[in-house]
Image (cartoon, coloured by chain):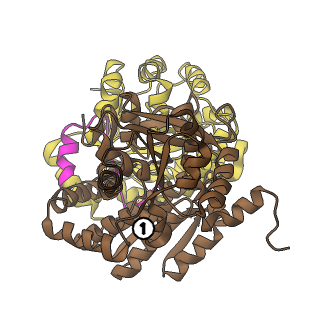
Amino acid sequence: MTRITDVFKKNKKVFIPFVTAGDPDLATTEKLIYAMEEAGAGIIELGIPFSDPVAEGPVIQEADNRALAAGFKIDHLFEMLKKVRQHTEIPLVFLTYANPIFTYGRDRFFAHCKETRIDGVIVPDVPYEEKDTLKDDAVRYGVEMISLIAPTSHDRVQMIAREAQGYIYLVSSMGVTGVREKITTNLGEIVEKIREVTDRPVAVGFGIAEPAQAAEMAALSDGAIVGSAIVKIVARYGKDAVEPVKAYVREMADAVRKVS
Amino acid sequence: MSNGRYGKHGGQYVPETLMNAVLELQEAYEHYKKDPEFLQELQALYHDYANRPSMLYYAERMTKDLGGARIYLKREDLNHTGAHKINNALGQCLLAKKMGKKRIIAETGAGQHGVATATVAALMGMECVVYMGKLDTERQALNVFRMKLLGADVVPVETGTMSLKDAVNEALREWSRRCEDTAYCIGSVMGPHPYPMMVRDFQKVIGEEVRQQMMEKEGRLPDIVMACVGGGSNAMGLFYDFIPDKEVQLIGVEAAGRGIDTAETAATIACGKPGIFHGMESYFLQDNDGQIAPVYSISAGLDYPGIGPEHAYLYDSGRAQYVPITDDESVKAFEYLSRIEGIIPAVESAHAVAYAMKLAPTLPKDKIIVVNLSGRGDKDVAAIARYKGVDLHD
């Protein structure tokens, strides 16, 4: 039982918003965390910006660029999160790439994660075959490694699901992150395969922007993850994004929670 | 440890969305690399289409002028399309065809790999899309036009630093959108396994030929073989066959740009740190937070913030040495070789020539250096003119 699985136990369906940390600055990110929790987020994913995020579409790439251009540093993020943890215990999950963790120092990174009670990390460019690169350090500090399963995973689905921690991030469609009009993958089939081997919760991400889409994805899994649609609002409103993001997250979270 | 490790380097660091595509490629390559029919077809293409073997040329005037070691030039610049890149493009496209892929995507820096891939795609009747940093499309406009002539689409990449690494990012993103019918033809000994191994295997013909040609001409192995290194494919191709011959010194020449004590450099071994990027653990130019550094070199083909994992291993183990050469030094070598031997080298290859110019005079006359002339310099003439402040339109 972890704080992540707890959230899924207590709420039938969980809405998971994503923002890029430091976009446009860390003070705004801090306010966004409180606002998104208030609006009904069950878990929050925080992107640690990377110069070359190969799994991201243009929206999140640009957010990473804005944050880095504004002087983002991992140390500053952890300082901000110490403040956040004086106000909320909402489960927080990092999304970043192998190199920032590797170069910052794996032991140092996960030690800080423990200190700021970060619940999990998603590292898209560390697949199942390479998970030992981070696992020992993550486990030592009680941080869960969240795995992705893709429409192209086929015979890998159960292998990944069996060893999954936290929740399973089910990628809705081919390609990179970003808003899509329609999601055509047969996700129900993949969820079934996952359920055969694990009772870990499954949340669907990539391409979700509309409340109806989020509800649909949550209906066939345990939750919906939304990144690019929120990051777009932050891009548009900058430091004034807190209220519009809050309104959007409320709408999405309500739609997800209504699913039974 | 996972597949494809060279010491601690290498691996398969790609998103799950690409993992099955990478494994499918690995399996296919493991099969075809032992398939006599595949190897025979590839040999025939090397010979009849790419004009292999490339000559090993004794640079007599250069040797006399420098007054030290004997210098041989391995003339990869005489291959079809004007660089060593054709060796790998033939191998990967033939493999893609065997795998039933209809479409080839590639990244390119200077444009040589893009041209080679577009060429082979035309030869094999496959659709081809080349990703190229927008800055590079401007620096190498001629190659952009060549690729279009060959029927390829060229996509200028406007993200990040708009150069080679960003072209790789975009190609990886495109591959994750469409991997079922598309093969990604990586141009160097980099990326996730099996690419570093596969590209090296398709390039190792360079070193194998050098060995044979050197035995014919001199009756012995060379003392030193050297090549420029960006990702490192021409160097790996030259080095590989000589790795077991400890008496043969292997030297990789990196692009120092404006100098390794400046931020405008692409010398990964000199200035980089261990990291994980573009599918592999290796050395990368980066800051303390692991953000990949913007790199700079006059040469668009060496303008890459990393180095192939097998090079990283050869460096760690001390088997190969890596030295930096600046823009200025490479431009001098570019002009020097043009005048003294009547050979205009690619500005990439000119980095290796520049180091030979430094090293040869310090060695006795019975020593032998082989320099890999990885490409020809026609594509660079306009850029060199600009560098020297000459306006070609006057």
The quarter of the picture where the C terminus of chain B appears is bottom right
**Residue pictured at 15% horizontal, 70% vertical:** B37
Residue B287 picture location, percent across and down: 59, 32
Report the span colored magenta. A154-177
As displayed, is residue A25 above or below residue B347? above
User: Can I make out residue B158 in this image?
Assistant: no
Task: Determine the image quadrant of residue A184.
Answer: bottom left
| In front of the other: A78 or A14 | A78
- Which chain did the image draw in yellow? A
Left or right: residue A150 compared with residue A180: left
Q: Which residue is mark 1?
A: B105
- What number of labels is visible? 1
| In front of the other: A69 or B216 | B216
Queried whether the magenta region covers residue A237, the answer comes back as no
The quarter of the picture where the N terminus of chain B appears is top left
Residue B49 picture location, percent across and down: 35, 76
As displayed, is residue A126 above or below residue A105? below
Q: Residues within 10 Å of mark 1 (few under 14, many from 20)?
A: many
Left or right: residue A254 compared with residue B197: right
As displayed, is residue B115 above or below residue A99? below
User: Mark 1 falls within which chain?
Assistant: B
The colour applied to the residues of chain B in this rendering is: brown
**Residue pictured at 68% horizontal, 65% vertical:** B381
Queried whether the magenta region covers residue A157, the answer comes back as yes
Left or right: residue A127 compared with residue B161: left
Left or right: residue A84 compared with residue B31: right
Q: Of helix, strand and loop, which one carries label 1?
A: strand
Task: Determine the image quadrant of residue A1.
Answer: top left
Please, what is the three-letter code of the amino acid marked with disc 1? Answer: Ile
Task: Determine the image quadrant of residue B393.
Answer: bottom right
